[in-house]
Amino acid sequence: MLYFARWKITLIVLVILVGAITTLPNFLSPATLRAMPDWLPKSRIVLGLDLQGGAYLLYEVDRADYIQKRLKTLEGDIRQTLRDEPRIGYTGLGVQGNGTQVRIRDLTRLDEARTRLSALTNPLVTNVFGGQAVDEFEMTVADDGLVRFSYTEQGLSQRISSIVQQSIEVIRLRLDEFGTTEPSIQRQGEDRILVEAPGEGDPQRLKELVGQTAQLTFHMVDQSMSAEQAMQSRPPVGTVVMYSAEDPPFPYLLEEAPLLSGEDLIDAQVAFDQQSNEPVVNFRFNTSGARTFSVVTQRNVGRPFAIVLDQEVISAPVIREPITGGSGQISGSFTVESANDLAVLLRAGALPAKLTVVEERSIGPGLGQDSVDAGRIASIIGAALVIGFMVLAYGRFGVIADLALATNIILIFGALTFLQATLTLPGIAGIVLTIGMAVDANVLIFERIREEARAGRSAISAIDAGYSRALGTILDANITTLIAALILFQLGSGPIRGFAVTLAIGIFTTVFSAFTVSRLLVALWVRWKRPSHLPI
Amino acid sequence: MLLRMIPDNTRIRFMWLRSVSFPLSAVMFLASIALFFSVGLNFGIDFKGGTVFEMKTMESPADISAIRTQLGTLNLGDVQVQQFGAEDEVLVRVQQPEGGELAQQAVVSQVREIFGESVEFRRVEVVGPRVSGELAQAGMIAVIASLVVILFYIWFRFEWHFAVGAILTTINDIVVTVGLFVVLQLEFSLSSIAAILTIIGYSLNDTVVVYDRIRENLRRYKKMALPELLDRSINEMLSRTVMTSVTTLLALIALYSFGGEVIRSFTLAMIFGVVIGTYSSIFLAAPFLILLKLRPSSVTGGDGGADADKADEGSSGSAASA
């Protein structure tokens, strides 16, 4: 146990050296770091959001909302399909619970209706290599003429999955231009998206950018009656009342079917109105959009139309002349920032479904820094107490245990830096706890050595037996803690995960430092002093 | 002169003390369960949903009643305002509003708006009803899963008696720690689950070390009566058990005093867990082995099969006397 081959000693020293070099950048100023030669590692420990401040936003696709919208679209598709020549008479078309249903009047044409409508079950291809095509909807036809479309479980989960995918793309486009920090966007579970923005203490604007559906539509304003009249009586068929974003909101009576939507846009930019000098958003349609827009504006000179964002009227200008160039301007009461955000939203496109914030945690940079400081002080004091106590209790051997502890701490930081693991506040607690528990291995060994010495062994033989007999115990004891740490890592998120990481890393470095480093130091000391009795 | 926490060669009769420690633990255990079901845990927003704001006011000390009045105008339902850490820091808890996640987001913007620039929002946490349910479930699974995995590990490394004894000991530690959360009404959050898992790790660590020595002594002293053997093993490990607890507690106390308000209850739970884990590995883990009727003969492996028969005789005698 006390003999070390030269290559082993070299290896141990090398490991410690590499650990120290990896740890070093964490304690240097950025300027010193830049001045260092290129071959030295320069990465630092990644601080968690709770330490550097930032926002953690967990979004969930609003299933109910999506299903309702999708079923409503399906209703329109069914109407269209049955109205195609030759028309099939129907009644009772509408959304019922989790499906859309319709009753075919003429039962003799039920088969024809079935064939025609079956195209609407919308097969979704599972993967590129064919595989199994899953229908989005299941169509059931009853003998009394009732045709019902309902979501299949697989169809829905696939829809949700692709919605999440699309939403991530859209969010990424939107956030590309967001501030200096780089938010991370990732899928979580089946229907969730996690957005993390380091350094963002107030995520209000971030939330507006991410969470807004940004469905832009253009509607003609119905002038057959005023919006107030429509609300008091009944609005004409095919129209709807929508409000402006102003305070108090102003109602408009609009044609329900949009002329054009945000999908027809190819560009949107912030500009300033030449007369009022207020910020506006200029947009350009794609070719087909431009054509439609030109036809509509030619036909409706002198009538107002409304630009609607997420069911809210932004502005309702009167068409003064036909717009044939395929570009237009949205003016509302924008600030430069809000105009800019709208332009970004329009360029990135609409979210395919509504997203809801189900969890939000934002930490201001002030608290983050305070936590780092508090963690640092607590670690230093904790380590000092433990180091002092070990010297008091074990004398020279205590110093050896302390050296092993120092190596341990260096290696923990080295491993954290190397793995680019995220250090969180509970993670710091994990390190402090490790400092306390790390000496356990040495305590086990030293107590064992004392015992062996009491049992009459010579100093060297007691030391030897102490190390070899304590090993099994040390391993058993640490593996149980490791199991707890691994499970914590699997099930935890964010800060807790950081705690599990430091705890787990701490276990490996502890076993290494106690069993290898301290043993080597003791061996060197024995070789040097050749003690006949134990100072322990 | 070196500091000795525990003198050499102690001969404390721990097994004899079990007539005190078992009833004492049973009372604590049952009281914790009773408290859990009658008073209940003070669940934080992680498990119950809701919103927490930590803010720093411009004036010091913070005018808590003014903040309360201001919040009162928003009609947010049950709102708690308390000082948190420094004098100018305030923690506001708003219960889960009706109307789910959207209503919650409205709460956040309302509160941010009403205070505006007059305070610095240091932390805002919002947990919706769906997520809080999942977090609670994940926490339960974590605790149970780690117990099961560790049970199998110890079973694999030792005899089943040890595995069962270690798990019983650990369950006791968990229950009593939860009892502490109830008594002090500490907020029970995700980090409390982390604290409990750490306590599981620590308590098992302690228990395994003692068991390891028991196993070794079972091989060495084949004729010794079980209670005597357990006493001997615990006494031999006593110095180590106490030393390790002391160093761990030193580190944790530093963390408790200087680590900041955010992790204070987390650290407090761990300090308590270390104390209870140390107690239980001495006063519960080993005596459980007597209850579970562990005999030296059931320990496999090790030295010499020749005197296995003799050992058997010796042990059956000891089991009878136990």
Image (spheres, coloured by chain):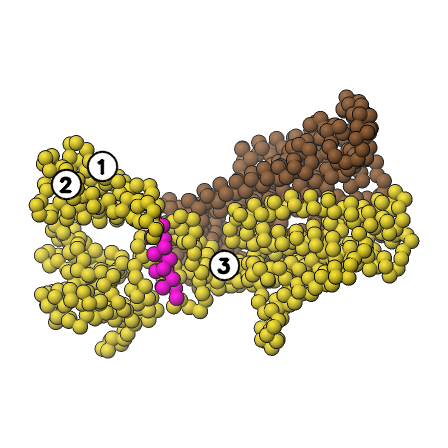
SS class, disc 2? helix
Q: Amino acid at mark 2?
A: Ala
Residue occupied by mark 1: A140
Q: Earlier in the sequence, mark 1 or mark 2?
A: 2
Question: Subunit of mark 1?
Answer: A
Judge whether B6 appears above or below A428 on screen.
above
Judge whether B320 appears above or below A77 on screen.
above
Q: Earlier in the sequence, mark 3 or mark 2?
A: 2
The chief SS type of the magenta part is helix
SS class, disc 3? strand
Quadrant holding the C terminus of chain B:
top right
Residue occupied by mark 3: A363
Q: Earlier in the sequence, mark 3 or mark 1?
A: 1
SS class, disc 1? strand
Q: Which residues are magenta?
A: A161-176
Nearer the camera: disc 3 or disc 2? 2
Mark 3 and mark 2: Cα distance apart in space:
58 Å
Residue occupied by mark 2: A113
Judge whether B167 appears above or below A333 on screen.
above
Question: Subunit of mark 2?
Answer: A
